[in-house]
Image: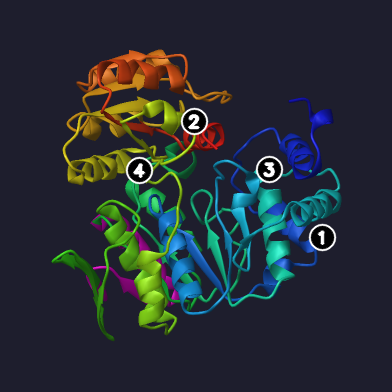
Amino acid sequence: MNQDTLSGSDAILARMMALHPKIIDLTLDRVWRLLSALGDPQKSLPPVIHIAGTNGKGSTLAMIRAGLEGAGLSAHAYTSPHLARFHERIRVAGSLISEPDLTAILDECYAANGGESITYFEITTCAALLAFARTPADHTLLEVGLGGRLDATNVVDRPALTVITPVSIDHQQFLGETLPQIAGEKAGIIKRGVPCIVGPQEDAALEVIEEMATRLGAPLKVHGQHWHVTTEHGRLVYQDETGLCDLPMPNLRGPHQIQNAGIALAALRHLGLGEAACEAAVTRAEWPARMQRLRSGPLVAAAGEAELWLDGGHNAAAGEMLARVLAELPPRPTHLICGMLNTKDVTGYLRPLANQAASLTAISIPGESATLSAEETATAAKSVGLDSATAESTRDALDAILARDPQARVLICGSLYLAGHILRENG
C-alpha cells in the first residue's frame, strides 16, 4: 500500500521505518536521547516487571498479567512483535491502546525525534513508555525485544522485579555465538539490589546469570533452588519457601507452559499476591499463536473435519517444545504448513518435529523480504526425514493436505510473521 493512502497510526509507523537503515541496531544512545526530549517518561512508570529470555517471555508475561488482574490490579503491558495489528504491542491499564491515542502518541514521538536516526523498535518503545507514564496503573510489564543489555526496554533504573525465562541459542548475529554470551546479554536487565526470578536454565547460562546477580547484589529466586513446579494427577503443583499451591493446569497448551506458569507464579508470590492471583494466572492467560486451536474463520471453514492449529515458535528450542505438545495430543495424522525467515535455524527447528508429523508443506511468508523460500524450507525438511512439498499459499497447502487426508490435524508454524498473516487472513 502506498504511504500516501495510509492514515492515522499506520502512516506514522510507515514514516518511522525510514528513520534508520537497519531494523536492528543494538545500542541505547538513541533511546536515551529521545526519552530526554520527551521528559524522561521511564522515570514515571508504575512499578516495572522487566522480562527477558529466549523462549516463554510472552507467555510468562501473559500469565503475570492475568494474575495481577485476577487480584483486582491493573497493568500496562508492552510486548513484541505484534501479530495482526501494531496496537497489540501496547496495552494501557489492561486495554489495547486506542487508535486515536496511538496516533497521537506516535506523532508526538516522531516530532520530538526531530528526524534523527532511530530504529522502529526504539521509537515505538519510547511511545509505549510515554503512554504508560501518563495513565495510572498498579504495574508495568515490559517484555524485552531482543537480548536485554542493549534492548530499548532496558531504561528503567530500578524496576520492582526482573524475570529471566529459559535462555537458548537464537539471534547469534546480534547476541553472540555461545550460550554464555547470550545469557550475558539477557542478564543485562538485572539491576543492583533488584530481585530476579530465574526460570529453568542450562548450567552454562545459569552460571552467567548468577555471576551478574552476585556482582550487583541482586537476590535471585531460581527454579530448582528457591521454587519448584510440577504436575500431579492432572494438577499443577507449585512450591516455594512460603508454601504450596495446588492449581488447575494452565490453559495455554504444552509442557513448556508448566515452567512458564512456575515463573509467573514465582513473580506473583514475590509481589505478595495470593491464591486468586495464582489461579487466574494459569486459567485466564491469553497468548495467540502459541499452539492456538483456530475455531472460526474462512480457513477453518475450508478445513472441514480437519483440526487447524497455529504456532509462531521459530527456533530449535521452540521446535522441541512443539514436538512435545504434539506428542501429548490425541493420536491423529499431523501435517505441517511451514514458513520461516532466512535468519533462523530451519533444520534445528524442524528436526524434533520430524517424529511427530506425517508431512510438511513449505510456503514462503507473504510480504516478508527475509522469508526463506518454500523450496529451501522443503529441502531442509527432507534433510531431517520429513516428507515435504511446496505450495504457493497457505490455502493451496491446506487444500493439498485435505485432498490426501480430510480428517488431518494441520499445524501452521515456523514464524510469528506467518502467524500474524494467518490471523489477518482468517479474521
- Residue 69 lies within the magenta run: no
SS label for mark 4: loop
Instruction: Please state, as top left, top right, bottom left or bottom right, where the C terminus lies in the image.
Output: top right
The picture places residue 158, in percent across and down from the top left corner, at 57, 75
Pointer 4 or 1: first along the chain: 1
Mark-to-mark CA distance, 1 and 2:
46 Å
Mark 3: few, some, or many residues within 10 Å (few <14, many ≥20)?
many
Pointer 4 or 3: first along the chain: 3
SS label for mark 2: helix
Q: Indicate left or right for 47 with 15 as reference.
A: left
Q: Which residue is mark 4?
A: 169
Q: Which residue is mark 1?
A: 37
The picture places residue 64, in percent across and down from the top left corner, at 44, 68
Segment colored magenta:
203-227
Q: Which mark is residue 298?
A: 2
Pointer 1 or 2: first along the chain: 1
- Name the residue located 74 percent from the left edge and 51 percent from the top edge: 99
Q: Amino acid at mark 2?
A: Pro
SS label for mark 3: loop
